[in-house]
Amino acid sequence: MSNLRTGAIVPVKTFSRAKKRLDISSEKKERLCRIMLESVLETISKSQSVERIAIVSRDEDAFAIGKRYGVAEIYDGQELGVNSAVRLADDYFLKEGFESTVVFPQDVPLIQTEDVNALLDFRTDGPDVLVVPSRKFDGTNALVRTPPGVMETHYDEDSYRIHLSTAERRGSRSALVLIQRMMMDMDDRSDLDLIMRYDLPASRSIAHVLL
């Protein structure tokens, strides 16, 4: 259902507060956050299935990166977490008449445009929920909701299982979708080491930061 008006939501935590579990300097963490966000935005922006991208953040560096890709900027002054950020974006896309949204974190730098398109091709015309889990099956690395208000999000709460069960309770079609590069997020050093094994531009940029 690629003809649905689709918005991408990218919640972005303030770079200086992100990725505390990585055993590297604050300067390197901030540089990694910039690289990952740029990679994610560039990938999504090339998808013909996504009409608009919205960044939800209060980080001016994140918005500066977003400007290069024409994103909508949603200011998250309180930064209360991913669920709160997604609610702000839901309000925006519902008011704009979008029929579907996909939520991506800022830390999935390996995703490619064909991955985004493949995920969105699994949709029906709704109500529909698609979940891509993290590789450790302890989180949600992509969440598609058609329509956007079909259910609230439950990040940081064993989220992929809760997203699927909530969709079922709401009477929505739901599916777990396994897309390898999309499942590769960066939470700790083991993730970082694995991501650097891939021969992709983002991996090479990340490796350069760590040298």
Image: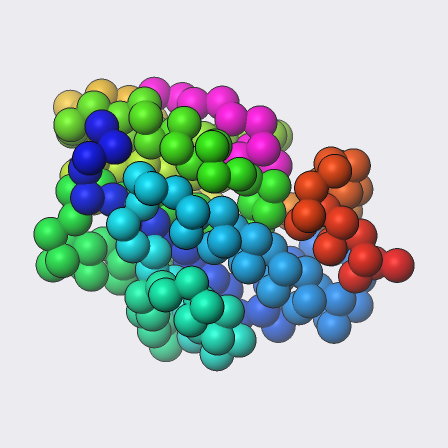
Residue 142 highlighted magenta (yes or no) = no
- Residue 165 in view of the camera: no
Question: Looking at the rendering, which quadrant does residue 36 occupy?
Answer: bottom right
Q: Name the residue furthest right.
A: 211
| Boundaries of the magenta span | 175-184
- Residue 67 in view of the camera: yes
Question: Looking at the rendering, which quadrant does residue 121 occupy?
Answer: top left
Residue 176 highlighted magenta (yes or no) = yes
Q: How many labels does the image show?
A: 0
The one nearer the camera, 165 or 203, is: 203
- Image quarter hosting the N terminus: top left
Residue at position x 15%, y 23% in the image: 171
Q: Position of residue 2 (x, y in %)?
A: 25, 32
Residue at position x 42%, y 71% in the image: 67
Residue at position x 19%, y 37% in the image: 4
Q: Where is residue 21 in the image (x, y as percent from the top left)?
A: 70, 55
Horizontally, residue 207 falls left or right of residue 156, namely right
Horizontally, residue 92 falls left or right of residue 113, namely left
The one nearer the camera, 150 or 68, is: 68
Q: Does 159 sit above or below residue 74?
A: above
Q: Position of residue 54 (x, y in %)?
A: 33, 60
Q: Does 100 sit above or below residue 34?
A: above
The one nearer the camera, 121 or 23, is: 121
Q: Does 14 sit above or below residue 6?
A: below
- Image quarter hosting the C terminus: bottom right
Q: Where is residue 188 in the image (x, y as percent from the top left)?
A: 71, 47
Q: Does 92 sit above or below residue 45?
A: below
- Give the image's coloring scheme: rainbow
Question: Looking at the rendering, which quadrant does residue 180 occupy?
Answer: top right
Residue at position x 34%, y 49% in the image: 8
